[in-house]
Protein backbone atom coordinates (compact mmCIF):
# COMPACT_ATOMS: atom_id res chain seq x y z
CA UNK A 1 0.00 0.00 0.00
CA UNK A 2 1.44 3.33 -1.09
CA UNK A 3 1.31 5.99 1.67
CA UNK A 4 3.50 8.96 0.64
CA UNK A 5 5.35 10.49 3.60
CA UNK A 6 4.86 14.12 2.54
CA UNK A 7 1.04 14.02 2.57
CA UNK A 8 -1.56 14.42 5.32
CA UNK A 9 -4.52 12.09 5.64
CA UNK A 10 -8.07 12.20 7.00
CA UNK A 11 -9.84 9.44 8.92
CA UNK A 12 -12.08 9.15 5.88
CA UNK A 13 -9.09 8.27 3.65
CA UNK A 14 -8.66 11.52 1.79
CA UNK A 15 -5.16 12.93 1.34
CA UNK A 16 -4.02 16.56 1.34
CA UNK A 17 -0.95 18.12 -0.23
CA UNK A 18 -0.20 21.66 0.89
CA UNK A 19 0.76 24.06 -1.91
CA UNK A 20 1.08 27.56 -0.44
CA UNK A 21 -2.36 28.40 0.99
CA UNK A 22 -4.08 25.78 -1.05
CA UNK A 23 -4.74 22.13 -0.39
CA UNK A 24 -4.75 19.60 -3.22
CA UNK A 25 -7.14 16.80 -2.26
CA UNK A 26 -7.61 13.22 -3.40
CA UNK A 27 -8.33 9.77 -2.01
CA UNK A 28 -5.66 7.41 -0.75
CA UNK A 29 -4.34 4.31 -2.45
CA UNK A 30 -6.05 2.28 0.28
CA UNK A 31 -9.37 4.02 -0.40
CA UNK A 32 -9.23 3.44 -4.14
CA UNK A 33 -8.36 -0.23 -3.61
CA UNK A 34 -11.34 -0.62 -1.29
CA UNK A 35 -13.73 1.15 -3.69
CA UNK A 36 -12.68 -0.90 -6.69
CA UNK A 37 -13.01 0.22 -10.29
CA UNK A 38 -14.19 3.85 -10.39
CA UNK A 39 -16.70 4.45 -13.17
CA UNK A 40 -17.99 7.94 -12.43
CA UNK A 41 -16.87 10.90 -10.34
CA UNK A 42 -19.28 13.66 -9.39
CA UNK A 43 -17.03 16.66 -8.84
CA UNK A 44 -17.82 19.69 -6.68
CA UNK A 45 -18.59 22.95 -8.44
CA UNK A 46 -15.82 25.49 -8.52
CA UNK A 47 -16.10 28.48 -6.17
CA UNK A 48 -18.30 26.71 -3.63
CA UNK A 49 -17.42 26.98 0.04
CA UNK A 50 -16.98 23.70 1.89
CA UNK A 51 -16.51 22.94 5.55
CA UNK A 52 -14.27 20.21 6.87
CA UNK A 53 -15.85 16.74 6.81
CA UNK A 54 -18.58 17.93 4.45
CA UNK A 55 -19.36 15.62 1.54
CA UNK A 56 -18.22 17.47 -1.57
CA UNK A 57 -17.68 14.82 -4.24
CA UNK A 58 -19.01 11.34 -5.02
CA UNK A 59 -17.17 8.39 -6.49
CA UNK A 60 -19.21 5.64 -8.09
CA UNK A 61 -17.41 2.34 -8.43
CA UNK A 62 -18.90 -0.58 -10.33
CA UNK A 63 -20.66 -1.76 -7.18
CA UNK A 64 -21.07 1.19 -4.86
CA UNK A 65 -21.56 4.89 -4.28
CA UNK A 66 -19.08 6.61 -1.94
CA UNK A 67 -19.10 10.14 -0.60
CA UNK A 68 -15.81 12.01 -0.53
CA UNK A 69 -15.43 14.50 2.31
CA UNK A 70 -13.53 17.76 2.25
CA UNK A 71 -10.61 17.20 4.63
CA UNK A 72 -10.26 20.97 5.26
CA UNK A 73 -12.58 23.98 5.03
CA UNK A 74 -12.33 26.60 2.31
CA UNK A 75 -13.27 27.48 -1.24
CA UNK A 76 -13.01 24.98 -4.07
CA UNK A 77 -10.88 26.82 -6.62
CA UNK A 78 -10.16 24.03 -9.06
CA UNK A 79 -11.51 20.58 -9.86
CA UNK A 80 -9.95 17.75 -11.85
CA UNK A 81 -12.05 17.84 -15.03
CA UNK A 82 -10.05 14.93 -16.44
CA UNK A 83 -11.95 12.61 -14.08
CA UNK A 84 -15.16 13.27 -15.99
CA UNK A 85 -13.87 11.30 -18.96
CA UNK A 86 -11.35 9.11 -17.17
CA UNK A 87 -12.61 8.15 -13.69
CA UNK A 88 -10.13 5.26 -13.74
CA UNK A 89 -7.36 7.79 -12.96
CA UNK A 90 -8.57 7.51 -9.36
CA UNK A 91 -7.46 3.85 -9.38
CA UNK A 92 -4.39 4.22 -11.55
CA UNK A 93 -2.78 7.26 -9.96
CA UNK A 94 -4.60 8.30 -6.77
CA UNK A 95 -1.88 10.71 -5.60
CA UNK A 96 -1.15 12.18 -9.03
CA UNK A 97 -3.48 12.35 -12.05
CA UNK A 98 -6.33 11.13 -9.86
CA UNK A 99 -6.47 14.25 -7.65
CA UNK A 100 -10.01 15.53 -7.07
CA UNK A 101 -9.99 19.23 -6.17
CA UNK A 102 -7.94 22.16 -4.88
CA UNK A 103 -9.27 24.00 -1.83
CA UNK A 104 -8.22 27.55 -0.89
CA UNK A 105 -7.93 26.96 2.84
CA UNK A 106 -9.73 29.11 5.40
CA UNK A 107 -7.52 28.03 8.26
CA UNK A 108 -4.21 26.26 7.76
CA UNK A 109 -4.27 25.12 11.38
CA UNK A 110 -6.84 22.51 10.37
CA UNK A 111 -3.98 20.59 8.82
CA UNK A 112 -2.73 19.79 12.31
CA UNK A 113 -5.87 17.77 12.92
CA UNK A 114 -5.10 15.46 10.02
CA UNK A 115 -2.95 12.34 10.28
CA UNK A 116 0.62 12.05 9.15
CA UNK A 117 1.66 9.03 7.08
CA UNK A 118 2.70 6.98 10.12
CA UNK A 119 -0.59 7.55 11.92
CA UNK A 120 -2.52 6.87 8.71
CA UNK A 121 -0.65 3.63 8.15
CA UNK A 122 -1.63 2.60 11.67
CA UNK A 123 -5.27 3.46 10.96
CA UNK A 124 -5.31 1.19 7.92
CA UNK A 125 -3.51 -1.59 9.78
CA UNK A 126 -6.23 -1.43 12.43
CA UNK A 127 -8.87 -2.01 9.78
CA UNK A 128 -9.87 1.38 8.44
CA UNK A 129 -11.65 3.40 11.11
CA UNK B 1 -18.83 -9.01 9.05
CA UNK B 2 -17.92 -12.34 10.54
CA UNK B 3 -21.49 -13.47 11.22
CA UNK B 4 -22.07 -15.09 7.87
CA UNK B 5 -21.83 -18.78 7.08
CA UNK B 6 -18.70 -20.03 5.38
CA UNK B 7 -18.77 -22.12 2.21
CA UNK B 8 -16.31 -25.03 1.86
CA UNK B 9 -14.20 -22.64 -0.26
CA UNK B 10 -13.83 -19.89 2.36
CA UNK B 11 -10.11 -20.51 2.94
CA UNK B 12 -9.48 -20.84 -0.78
CA UNK B 13 -11.02 -17.39 -1.40
CA UNK B 14 -8.72 -15.85 1.17
CA UNK B 15 -5.74 -17.54 -0.40
CA UNK B 16 -6.65 -16.06 -3.79
CA UNK B 17 -7.06 -12.58 -2.34
CA UNK B 18 -10.85 -12.46 -2.40
CA UNK B 19 -12.35 -9.48 -0.58
CA UNK B 20 -14.98 -11.10 1.58
CA UNK B 21 -18.40 -9.59 2.19
CA UNK B 22 -21.62 -10.87 3.68
CA UNK B 23 -24.22 -11.79 1.09
CA UNK B 24 -27.53 -13.51 1.84
CA UNK B 25 -26.14 -14.70 5.17
CA UNK B 26 -22.91 -16.04 3.60
CA UNK B 27 -19.33 -14.83 3.54
CA UNK B 28 -18.35 -14.67 -0.10
CA UNK B 29 -15.77 -12.81 -2.20
CA UNK B 30 -17.12 -9.66 -3.86
CA UNK B 31 -14.00 -9.50 -6.00
CA UNK B 32 -10.41 -10.73 -6.33
CA UNK B 33 -8.40 -8.75 -8.88
CA UNK B 34 -11.21 -6.31 -9.71
CA UNK B 35 -14.76 -6.45 -11.00
CA UNK B 36 -13.98 -5.12 -14.47
CA UNK B 37 -11.06 -7.50 -15.00
CA UNK B 38 -13.03 -10.52 -13.76
CA UNK B 39 -16.03 -9.51 -15.88
CA UNK B 40 -13.83 -9.26 -18.95
CA UNK B 41 -12.25 -12.66 -18.22
CA UNK B 42 -15.67 -14.35 -18.16
CA UNK B 43 -16.75 -12.66 -21.41
CA UNK B 44 -13.55 -13.50 -23.30
CA UNK B 45 -11.88 -16.44 -21.51
CA UNK B 46 -13.27 -17.95 -18.32
CA UNK B 47 -14.09 -17.24 -14.69
CA UNK B 48 -14.56 -19.50 -11.68
CA UNK B 49 -17.33 -18.79 -9.17
CA UNK B 50 -18.17 -20.27 -5.79
CA UNK B 51 -21.93 -20.73 -5.79
CA UNK B 52 -22.00 -23.17 -2.88
CA UNK B 53 -24.33 -20.83 -1.00
CA UNK B 54 -27.16 -21.75 -3.37
CA UNK B 55 -29.78 -24.06 -1.90
CA UNK B 56 -30.74 -27.51 -3.16
CA UNK B 57 -33.94 -29.40 -2.46
CA UNK B 58 -34.49 -32.98 -3.55
CA UNK B 59 -38.05 -33.88 -4.52
CA UNK B 60 -38.90 -37.59 -4.67
CA UNK B 61 -42.05 -39.66 -4.84
CA UNK B 62 -44.78 -40.92 -7.12
CA UNK B 63 -46.41 -37.48 -7.18
CA UNK B 64 -43.24 -35.45 -7.64
CA UNK B 65 -44.38 -34.19 -11.03
CA UNK B 66 -47.91 -33.08 -10.07
CA UNK B 67 -46.43 -31.41 -6.97
CA UNK B 68 -43.94 -29.43 -9.05
CA UNK B 69 -46.63 -28.55 -11.57
CA UNK B 70 -48.60 -26.97 -8.72
CA UNK B 71 -45.50 -25.27 -7.29
CA UNK B 72 -43.95 -23.54 -10.30
CA UNK B 73 -45.15 -21.61 -13.34
CA UNK B 74 -43.19 -23.40 -16.07
CA UNK B 75 -44.39 -26.73 -17.50
CA UNK B 76 -42.28 -29.36 -15.74
CA UNK B 77 -43.92 -32.12 -17.81
CA UNK B 78 -41.93 -30.90 -20.80
CA UNK B 79 -38.64 -31.80 -19.11
CA UNK B 80 -36.78 -34.88 -20.31
CA UNK B 81 -34.52 -36.89 -18.01
CA UNK B 82 -31.21 -35.08 -17.51
CA UNK B 83 -32.69 -31.80 -18.65
CA UNK B 84 -32.75 -28.55 -16.65
CA UNK B 85 -35.51 -25.97 -16.58
CA UNK B 86 -35.57 -22.38 -15.35
CA UNK B 87 -38.80 -21.38 -13.67
CA UNK B 88 -40.36 -18.81 -11.38
CA UNK B 89 -42.25 -20.03 -8.29
CA UNK B 90 -45.22 -17.90 -7.30
CA UNK B 91 -47.60 -17.19 -4.46
CA UNK B 92 -51.29 -17.69 -5.11
CA UNK B 93 -51.63 -13.92 -5.63
CA UNK B 94 -49.08 -14.03 -8.46
CA UNK B 95 -46.11 -12.42 -6.67
CA UNK B 96 -42.84 -14.33 -6.91
CA UNK B 97 -41.50 -16.57 -4.12
CA UNK B 98 -38.24 -17.27 -5.96
CA UNK B 99 -36.79 -18.27 -9.30
CA UNK B 100 -35.10 -21.64 -9.55
CA UNK B 101 -33.64 -24.41 -11.66
CA UNK B 102 -35.25 -27.84 -11.84
CA UNK B 103 -33.01 -30.81 -12.66
CA UNK B 104 -34.99 -33.87 -13.72
CA UNK B 105 -33.45 -37.22 -12.79
CA UNK B 106 -36.60 -39.25 -13.36
CA UNK B 107 -40.38 -38.85 -13.42
CA UNK B 108 -40.29 -39.34 -9.64
CA UNK B 109 -37.09 -37.47 -8.74
CA UNK B 110 -35.99 -33.86 -9.21
CA UNK B 111 -33.37 -31.54 -7.74
CA UNK B 112 -34.39 -27.90 -7.27
CA UNK B 113 -31.68 -25.22 -7.04
CA UNK B 114 -32.86 -22.12 -5.19
CA UNK B 115 -31.45 -18.73 -4.16
CA UNK B 116 -29.35 -18.74 -0.98
CA UNK B 117 -31.18 -15.86 0.69
CA UNK B 118 -34.51 -17.61 0.08
CA UNK B 119 -33.70 -21.12 1.33
CA UNK B 120 -35.75 -20.95 4.56
CA UNK B 121 -38.68 -19.19 2.92
CA UNK B 122 -38.70 -21.56 -0.08
CA UNK B 123 -38.39 -24.61 2.11
CA UNK B 124 -41.45 -23.64 4.20
CA UNK B 125 -43.40 -22.79 1.09
CA UNK B 126 -42.54 -26.11 -0.55
CA UNK B 127 -43.42 -28.09 2.59
CA UNK B 128 -46.74 -26.29 2.88
CA UNK B 129 -47.55 -27.01 -0.76
CA UNK B 130 -46.49 -30.64 -0.54
CA UNK B 131 -49.25 -31.61 1.92
CA UNK B 132 -51.64 -32.79 -0.80
CA UNK B 133 -49.06 -34.88 -2.65
CA UNK B 134 -47.26 -38.21 -2.18
CA UNK B 135 -43.87 -36.62 -2.23
CA UNK B 136 -40.80 -36.42 -0.03
CA UNK B 137 -38.70 -33.26 0.24
CA UNK B 138 -35.10 -33.18 1.45
CA UNK B 139 -33.19 -29.97 2.04
CA UNK B 140 -29.71 -30.84 0.74
CA UNK B 141 -28.38 -27.27 0.86
CA UNK B 142 -25.61 -27.99 3.35
CA UNK B 143 -24.57 -31.24 1.68
CA UNK B 144 -23.85 -29.91 -1.80
CA UNK B 145 -21.13 -27.50 -2.89
CA UNK B 146 -21.38 -25.79 -6.24
CA UNK B 147 -18.74 -24.31 -8.53
CA UNK B 148 -19.59 -22.41 -11.72
CA UNK B 149 -17.08 -22.30 -14.56
CA UNK B 150 -18.25 -19.70 -17.06
CA UNK B 151 -16.89 -18.30 -20.28
CA UNK B 152 -16.00 -19.26 -23.86
CA UNK B 153 -13.00 -21.38 -22.74
CA UNK B 154 -14.97 -23.23 -20.03
CA UNK B 155 -15.37 -26.48 -21.94
CA UNK B 156 -11.66 -26.73 -22.84
CA UNK B 157 -10.69 -26.17 -19.21
CA UNK B 158 -13.20 -28.60 -17.72
CA UNK B 159 -12.18 -31.25 -20.27
CA UNK B 160 -8.73 -31.31 -18.64
CA UNK B 161 -10.26 -32.79 -15.47
CA UNK B 162 -12.93 -35.15 -16.74
CA UNK B 163 -13.67 -37.74 -19.42
CA UNK B 164 -17.36 -36.83 -19.35
CA UNK B 165 -18.59 -36.04 -22.88
CA UNK B 166 -18.90 -32.30 -22.30
CA UNK B 167 -19.38 -31.55 -25.99
CA UNK B 168 -22.55 -33.65 -25.92
CA UNK B 169 -24.15 -31.70 -23.06
CA UNK B 170 -26.56 -29.26 -24.68
CA UNK B 171 -27.49 -25.94 -23.11
CA UNK B 172 -29.63 -26.64 -20.03
CA UNK B 173 -28.87 -30.37 -19.86
CA UNK B 174 -26.77 -32.26 -17.32
CA UNK B 175 -24.87 -35.44 -16.54
CA UNK B 176 -26.15 -36.75 -13.18
CA UNK B 177 -23.23 -39.01 -12.33
CA UNK B 178 -20.10 -37.64 -13.91
CA UNK B 179 -16.59 -38.25 -12.65
CA UNK B 180 -14.27 -35.31 -12.19
CA UNK B 181 -10.78 -35.93 -10.76
CA UNK B 182 -12.09 -39.26 -9.49
CA UNK B 183 -14.91 -37.53 -7.58
CA UNK B 184 -18.62 -38.05 -8.20
CA UNK B 185 -20.20 -34.82 -9.43
CA UNK B 186 -23.15 -33.45 -11.35
CA UNK B 187 -22.12 -31.42 -14.39
CA UNK B 188 -24.68 -29.16 -16.06
CA UNK B 189 -24.38 -26.73 -18.93
CA UNK B 190 -26.07 -23.85 -17.14
CA UNK B 191 -25.11 -20.53 -15.63
CA UNK B 192 -26.18 -16.99 -15.06
CA UNK B 193 -23.59 -14.89 -16.85
CA UNK B 194 -24.81 -14.87 -20.45
CA UNK B 195 -21.83 -17.00 -21.48
CA UNK B 196 -21.41 -20.68 -22.20
CA UNK B 197 -20.36 -22.56 -19.10
CA UNK B 198 -20.87 -25.33 -16.61
CA UNK B 199 -22.02 -25.79 -13.06
CA UNK B 200 -20.37 -28.54 -11.05
CA UNK B 201 -22.15 -29.91 -7.97
CA UNK B 202 -19.92 -31.83 -5.62
CA UNK B 203 -19.43 -33.01 -2.03
CA UNK B 204 -18.41 -30.08 0.19
CA UNK B 205 -15.14 -31.85 1.13
CA UNK B 206 -14.15 -32.13 -2.55
CA UNK B 207 -14.84 -28.49 -3.43
CA UNK B 208 -11.45 -26.99 -2.55
CA UNK B 209 -9.53 -29.71 -4.41
CA UNK B 210 -11.69 -29.29 -7.54
CA UNK B 211 -11.34 -25.49 -7.35
CA UNK B 212 -7.55 -25.64 -7.08
CA UNK B 213 -7.25 -28.11 -9.96
CA UNK B 214 -9.53 -26.02 -12.15
CA UNK B 215 -7.48 -22.91 -11.38
CA UNK B 216 -4.26 -24.69 -12.22
CA UNK B 217 -5.50 -26.24 -15.47
CA UNK B 218 -7.33 -23.05 -16.39
CA UNK B 219 -4.37 -20.75 -15.98
CA UNK B 220 -3.07 -21.14 -19.56
CA UNK B 221 -6.59 -20.33 -20.80
CA UNK B 222 -6.77 -17.09 -18.82
CA UNK B 223 -9.11 -18.40 -16.11
CA UNK B 224 -9.59 -16.01 -13.18
CA UNK B 225 -11.40 -16.53 -9.89
CA UNK B 226 -14.52 -14.34 -10.08
CA UNK B 227 -16.56 -12.76 -7.30
CA UNK B 228 -20.10 -11.65 -6.60
CA UNK B 229 -19.43 -8.22 -8.10
CA UNK B 230 -18.90 -9.46 -11.63
CA UNK B 231 -21.51 -12.17 -11.20
CA UNK B 232 -23.94 -9.28 -10.85
CA UNK B 233 -22.62 -7.14 -13.72
CA UNK B 234 -22.58 -10.21 -16.01
CA UNK B 235 -26.15 -11.25 -15.27
CA UNK B 236 -27.22 -7.61 -15.42
CA UNK B 237 -25.82 -7.12 -18.95
CA UNK B 238 -27.62 -10.29 -20.02
CA UNK B 239 -30.76 -8.85 -18.31
CA UNK B 240 -31.37 -11.99 -16.25
CA UNK B 241 -33.60 -11.09 -13.31
CA UNK B 242 -32.22 -11.16 -9.77
CA UNK B 243 -34.54 -12.06 -6.92
CA UNK B 244 -35.06 -9.05 -4.66
CA UNK B 245 -34.50 -6.70 -7.58
CA UNK B 246 -36.40 -7.60 -10.76
CA UNK B 247 -38.45 -10.30 -9.01
CA UNK B 248 -40.14 -10.18 -5.61
CA UNK B 249 -43.38 -10.81 -3.76
CA UNK B 250 -44.58 -7.55 -5.38
CA UNK B 251 -43.40 -8.36 -8.90
CA UNK B 252 -44.94 -11.17 -10.94
CA UNK B 253 -42.90 -13.10 -13.52
CA UNK B 254 -44.92 -11.45 -16.29
CA UNK B 255 -44.09 -7.99 -14.97
CA UNK B 256 -40.44 -9.08 -14.90
CA UNK B 257 -40.68 -10.06 -18.58
CA UNK B 258 -40.55 -13.83 -17.97
CA UNK B 259 -43.72 -14.64 -19.89
CA UNK B 260 -42.14 -17.61 -21.69
CA UNK B 261 -41.57 -19.32 -18.34
CA UNK B 262 -45.23 -19.00 -17.34
CA UNK B 263 -47.35 -21.73 -18.97
CA UNK B 264 -50.91 -20.78 -18.17
CA UNK B 265 -52.19 -23.57 -20.41
CA UNK B 266 -50.94 -26.32 -18.08
CA UNK B 267 -52.87 -27.69 -15.07
CA UNK B 268 -53.60 -25.46 -12.11
CA UNK B 269 -50.65 -23.85 -10.29
CA UNK B 270 -50.07 -21.19 -7.66
CA UNK B 271 -50.74 -17.76 -9.10
CA UNK B 272 -52.30 -19.07 -12.29
CA UNK B 273 -55.47 -16.98 -12.10
CA UNK B 274 -53.62 -13.68 -11.69
CA UNK B 275 -50.95 -14.57 -14.22
CA UNK B 276 -53.45 -15.75 -16.86
CA UNK B 277 -55.31 -12.46 -16.43
CA UNK B 278 -52.07 -10.51 -16.82
CA UNK B 279 -51.27 -12.54 -19.93
CA UNK B 280 -54.60 -11.79 -21.58
CA UNK B 281 -55.08 -8.22 -20.41
CA UNK B 282 -51.48 -7.08 -20.20
CA UNK B 283 -49.50 -5.90 -17.17
CA UNK B 284 -49.72 -2.44 -15.63
CA UNK B 285 -46.00 -2.27 -14.82
CA UNK B 286 -43.00 -3.99 -16.35
CA UNK B 287 -39.24 -4.27 -16.16
CA UNK B 288 -37.49 -2.40 -18.97
CA UNK B 289 -33.92 -1.59 -19.86
CA UNK B 290 -32.56 1.93 -19.73
CA UNK B 291 -29.38 3.57 -20.92
CA UNK B 292 -28.12 6.65 -19.12
CA UNK B 293 -27.74 9.64 -21.43
CA UNK B 294 -26.66 12.15 -18.79
CA UNK B 295 -23.67 11.54 -16.56
CA UNK B 296 -24.41 9.35 -13.58
CA UNK B 297 -24.96 5.80 -12.41
CA UNK B 298 -28.51 4.68 -11.66
CA UNK B 299 -28.80 2.45 -8.60
CA UNK B 300 -31.55 0.22 -7.22
CA UNK B 301 -34.51 2.13 -5.73
CA UNK B 302 -33.72 5.45 -7.47
CA UNK B 303 -37.00 6.97 -8.71
CA UNK B 304 -37.68 7.32 -12.44
CA UNK B 305 -39.70 10.20 -13.87
CA UNK B 306 -41.38 11.17 -17.13
CA UNK B 307 -42.14 14.89 -17.33
CA UNK B 308 -41.79 15.32 -13.55
CA UNK B 309 -44.22 12.50 -12.76
CA UNK B 310 -42.75 9.43 -11.10
CA UNK B 311 -43.41 6.37 -13.26
CA UNK B 312 -41.34 3.76 -11.44
CA UNK B 313 -38.03 2.82 -9.86
CA UNK B 314 -34.68 1.40 -10.84
CA UNK B 315 -34.41 -2.29 -9.86
CA UNK B 316 -30.73 -2.71 -10.80
CA UNK B 317 -28.38 -0.03 -12.07
CA UNK B 318 -24.69 -0.26 -12.78
CA UNK B 319 -21.87 0.47 -15.09
CA UNK B 320 -21.98 -2.25 -17.76
CA UNK B 321 -18.35 -3.21 -18.43
CA UNK B 322 -18.82 -4.92 -21.82
CA UNK B 323 -20.82 -1.99 -23.17
CA UNK B 324 -18.77 0.66 -21.37
CA UNK B 325 -22.03 2.46 -20.57
CA UNK B 326 -24.16 3.10 -17.52
CA UNK B 327 -27.28 0.99 -17.82
CA UNK B 328 -30.28 0.14 -15.69
CA UNK B 329 -33.24 -2.15 -15.28
CA UNK B 330 -36.34 -0.28 -14.16
CA UNK B 331 -39.85 -1.27 -13.12
CA UNK B 332 -42.04 1.28 -14.92
CA UNK B 333 -45.72 1.76 -15.54
CA UNK B 334 -46.48 0.06 -18.84
CA UNK B 335 -47.77 3.17 -20.62
CA UNK B 336 -44.38 4.80 -20.09
CA UNK B 337 -42.30 1.81 -21.12
CA UNK B 338 -41.96 2.08 -24.91
CA UNK B 339 -38.48 1.63 -26.33
CA UNK B 340 -37.03 5.02 -27.17
CA UNK B 341 -39.05 6.81 -24.46
CA UNK B 342 -36.95 9.42 -22.61
CA UNK B 343 -37.03 9.30 -18.80
CA UNK B 344 -35.24 11.03 -15.92
CA UNK B 345 -33.53 9.18 -13.10
CA UNK B 346 -33.23 11.09 -9.84
CA UNK B 347 -29.62 10.75 -8.67
CA UNK B 348 -28.76 12.57 -5.44
CA UNK B 349 -31.50 15.14 -6.03
CA UNK B 350 -30.68 15.80 -9.67
CA UNK B 351 -32.65 14.67 -12.70
CA UNK B 352 -30.37 12.78 -15.08
CA UNK B 353 -31.74 11.83 -18.48
CA UNK B 354 -31.94 8.26 -19.74
CA UNK B 355 -33.62 6.39 -22.57
CA UNK B 356 -35.56 3.13 -22.61
CA UNK B 357 -33.71 0.56 -24.70
CA UNK B 358 -34.22 -3.04 -25.78
CA UNK B 359 -33.18 -5.96 -23.57
CA UNK B 360 -30.85 -7.76 -23.25
CA UNK B 361 -27.96 -5.30 -23.22
CA UNK B 362 -25.56 -8.10 -24.09
CA UNK B 363 -26.02 -11.34 -25.99
CA UNK B 364 -23.17 -13.64 -26.84
CA UNK B 365 -22.55 -14.36 -30.47
CA UNK B 366 -23.82 -17.61 -31.94
CA UNK B 367 -26.41 -18.09 -29.23
Image (cartoon, coloured by chain):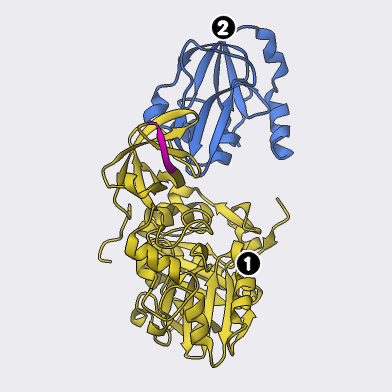
Chain colours: A blue, B yellow
Q: Measured along the vertical axis of the image, is residue B104 above or below residue B1? A: below
In which quadrant of the rendered view does residue B345 lie? top left
Q: CA distance from mark 2 to mark 1?
A: 61 Å
SS type, badge 1: helix
Q: Please identify the dominant SS of the magenta region.
A: strand
Q: Label 1: how many residues lie within 10 Å, few (<14), some (14-19) or many (20+)?
A: few
Q: Is residue B41 visible?
A: yes
Mark 2 neighbour class, 10 Å CA radius: few under 14, some 14 to 19, many 20 or more: few
Eyeballing the image, is B360 above or below B203?
A: above
Residue under circle 1? B121
Q: Position of residue B258 (x, y in %)?
A: 38, 63
Above or below B248: residue B81 = below
The residue that label 2 is drawn on is A20
Visible residue check, residue B88: no
Magenta region includes residue B218 = no
Please give the label number shown on residue B130.
none
Residue B98 as seen in the image, left or right of residue B196: right
- Magenta residues, as a range? B308-312
In the rendered image, residues at marks 2 and 1 fall on the same chain: no
Which of these two is toward me, B130 or B28?
B130
Q: Residue A97's x, y, as percent?
A: 45, 25
Helix, strand or loop at mark 2 = loop
Residue positioned 46% across, 18% down in the render: A79
Amino acid sequence: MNIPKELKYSNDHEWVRLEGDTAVVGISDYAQSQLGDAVFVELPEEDIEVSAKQGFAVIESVKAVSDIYAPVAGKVIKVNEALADAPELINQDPYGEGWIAVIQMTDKKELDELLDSTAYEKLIAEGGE
Amino acid sequence: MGQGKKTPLYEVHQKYGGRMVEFGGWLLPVQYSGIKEEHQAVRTKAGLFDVSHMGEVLVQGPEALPFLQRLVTNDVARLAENQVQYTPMCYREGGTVDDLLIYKYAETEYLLVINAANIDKDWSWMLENSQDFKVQLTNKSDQIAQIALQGPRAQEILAKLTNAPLEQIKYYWFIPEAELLGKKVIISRTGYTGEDGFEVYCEPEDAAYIWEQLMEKGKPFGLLPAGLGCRDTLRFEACFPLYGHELSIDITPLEAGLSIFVKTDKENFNGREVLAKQKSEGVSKKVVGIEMIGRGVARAQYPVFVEEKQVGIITTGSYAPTLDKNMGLALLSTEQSAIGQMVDVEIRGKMISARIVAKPFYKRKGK
